[in-house]
Image (spheres, grey):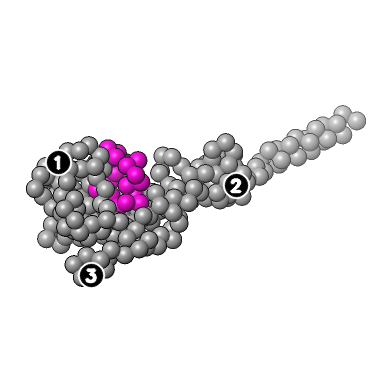
Amino acid sequence: MASTLVLMLVSLSLILIYIISLPLPTMAISSCKGPCKTPNDCAGQLTCINRKCNDDPAVGTHICSGGGGGGGGGGGNCKSSGTLNCGGKSFPQFTCSPPVTSSTRAKLTLNDFSEGGEGGDPSECDGRFHSNSERVVALSTGWYDEGSRCERLIRITASNGRSVTAKVVDECDSVNGCDREHAGLPPCRNNIVDGSAAVWNVLGLNKDLGIVDVTWSLA
């Protein structure tokens, strides 16, 4: 009788160990407004807020709200909102930019933010001009997001592996242009990070190129 009881206890112990060792059931990866318990339950750049997958404020995405990652609609499908005729040429206008991710692809251009430079009027964020030794940038209209990223630091990474942090001080207007306020320049494309000479220097880039491929994220 005693041996039978021992065998039963051993069997129960083995069954209990087996149950404990089984992996816990996990929730399927959810998209916008889908159910979640932790951020790992949400797809891509989404996070779990009030048990539902939503845009992550720390990343700055606007996937669920339809903001195109930075103001202006359409998620990743950012289409031209019109054209602007400038000097006999037509330039596309954009109110949106591609979605912001942890490594957003962009074109880095060179800008002179100092008084009398090609930047035109003072920077929108602080109403000031900035010397070429300052690490400052302007973002396309969608990414500028009506000034929500003013004074924020972003990290820019070049194809050579170098990176730099720079402060957002202005909008690279993707809608308006060809006037005094914009120093006669046409509208920016919707994927522009317009950087000062200091940004280019830290990245070790040849300023004569004028435009290069980079990635950027919120710092």
Image location of residue 94, percent across then percent down = 34, 58
Q: Is residue 110 visible to the viewer in this orientation of the structure?
A: no
Query: What amino acid is found at the position of numbered circle 2 in the picture?
Result: Gly
Measure the C-alpha gap from mark 1 to mark 3: 30 Å
Local packing at callout 3 (Cα closer than 10 Å; few below 14, some 14-19, many 20+) is few
Q: Which residue is mark 3?
A: 89
Q: Amino acid at mark 1?
A: Phe
* Quarter of the image with the N terminus in it: top right
Q: Residue furthest bottom?
A: 88
Q: Secondary structure at mark 1?
A: loop
Residue where numbered disc 1 is placed:
129
Image position of 129 with respect to 93: above or below: above
The residue at 15%/49% (across/down) is 120
Q: Check disc 2: other Cα within 10 Å, few if <14, some if 14-19, many if 20+.
A: some
Give the side of residue 16 with respect to residue 172, left or right: right
Mark 3 vs mark 2, CA separation in Å: 46 Å
> How far apart are the two marked residues, 2 and 1, measured between alpha carbons?
45 Å
* Residue at the left extreme, as displayed: 116
Q: Give the x, y percent position of residue 134.
A: 15, 41
Magenta span covers which residues?
A: 138-160
Which sits earlier in the primary sequence, circle 2 or circle 1?
2
Nearest to viewer (mark 1 / mark 3): 3
Q: Which mark is residue 34?
A: 2
Number of disc labels: 3
Give the quadrant of residue 191. bottom left
Residue 60: image x %, image y %? 40, 44
Residue type, label 3: Lys
Pick the quarter of the image with the C terminus: top left
- Asked if the residue at tag 2 contacts the one at tag 3, i.e. Cβ–Cβ closer than 8 Å, the answer is no
